[in-house]
Image (cartoon, rainbow, N blue to C red):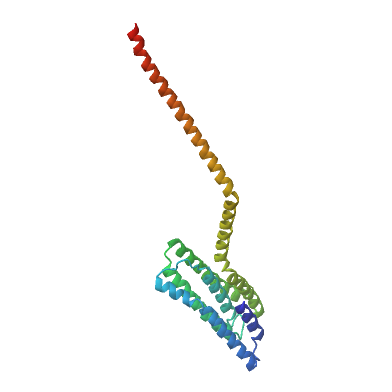
């Protein structure tokens, strides 16, 4: 949100007649934005030391890279003149985020994940090149170019701020389903325990019935075997 407010403020102040106070605000905004872009450095130092991306998601960095490339394009002199500060901070951010994505590609152990990240990165680069070419060739005024690229920048802001949901949503669904399982277990635990006890009792009764039948058969055959010799001796 901070970056979006800074971008809007920059556009509002991007005129040739800026006061020293306005310029100070812009420089301060650039410094704060740079701090924001450098905030994941500790995470990637950890990835570099461990040699693995672990469970980190590349989506926020790919989204931020797309957003910064869009704003860097917006700051070009042929799109929106007198936007040097906007151009410099976002060009710097592009290199920072691109470095993060490259580190992720190097240390990602899953080949499928690495391929997906590479394809998304390639598609973002191709999209920005085509956008720059089409805007400069087809839109012949600064206002039209600024409007078209500005809409893409707004989209980039939305994607960047929504990107953490790619991590939060699966975890949230996992928490929801896990809680549902625990709730069902707690609800039906006593009934399940009672049914298992009844089943065990029925099995025990069935075993006793079968055992009694076997004993009866053995006893009957013993009596028969004992009577036959006696009858033969009598005759």
Which corner quadrant holds the N terminus? Answer: bottom right
Position of 94 with respect to 225 (left or right) is right
* Coordinates of residue 125 in the picture (x, y in percent): 52, 71
**Above or below, 57 relative to 32:** above
Image spot of residue 220 (x, y percent) = 42, 20
> Total of numbered circles in the picture?
0
Of all residues shown, which one is farthest toward the top?
235
In the image shown, does 86 or 3 lie closer to the viewer? 3
Residue 69, quarter of picture: bottom right
As drawn, 60 above or below 198: below
The residue sitting at the bottom extreme is 20
Nearer-the-camera pick, 198 or 25 = 198
The C terminus sits in image quarter: top left
Task: Report which quarter residue 172 is drawn in.
Answer: bottom right
Q: Residue at x 35, y 12 (%)?
A: 230
- Identified at 45% across, 74% down, the residue is 44
Which residue extends farthest left?
A: 233
Q: Nearer the viewer, residue 206 or 42?
A: 206
Q: Is residue 34 above or below residue 185?
A: below
Residue 63 location in percent, x, y? 55, 71
């Amino acid at each position: 949100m901070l970056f979006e407010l800074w971008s809007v403020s920059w556009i509002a102040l991007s005129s040739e007649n800026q006061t020293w106070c306005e310029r100070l605000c812009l420089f301060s905004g650039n410094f704060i934005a740079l701090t924001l872009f450098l905030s994941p450095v500790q995470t990637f130092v950890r990835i570099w030391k461990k040699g693995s991306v672990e469970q980190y998601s590349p989506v926020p960095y790919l989204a931020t890279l797309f957003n910064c490339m869009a704003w860097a394009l917006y700051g070009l002199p042929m799109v929106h003149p007198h936007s040097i500060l906007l151009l410099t901070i976002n060009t710097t951010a592009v290199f920072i985020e691109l470095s993060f994505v490259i580190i992720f590609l190097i240390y990602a152990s899953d080949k499928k994940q690495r391929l997906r990240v590479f394809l998304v990165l390639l598609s973002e680069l191709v999209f920005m090149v085509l956008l720059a070419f089409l805007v400069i060739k087809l839109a012949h005024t600064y206002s039209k170019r600024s409007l078209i690229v500005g809409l893409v920048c707004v989209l980039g802001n939305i994607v960047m701020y929504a990107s953490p949901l790619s991590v939060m949503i699966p975890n949230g669904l996992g928490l929801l389903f896990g809680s549902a399982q625990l709730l069902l277990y707690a609800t039906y635990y006593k009934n399940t325990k009672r049914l298992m006890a009844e089943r065990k009792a029925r099995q025990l009764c069935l075993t006793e019935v079968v055992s009694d039948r076997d004993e009866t058969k053995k006893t009957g055959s013993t009596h028969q075997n004992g009577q036959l010799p006696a009858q033969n001796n009598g005759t």
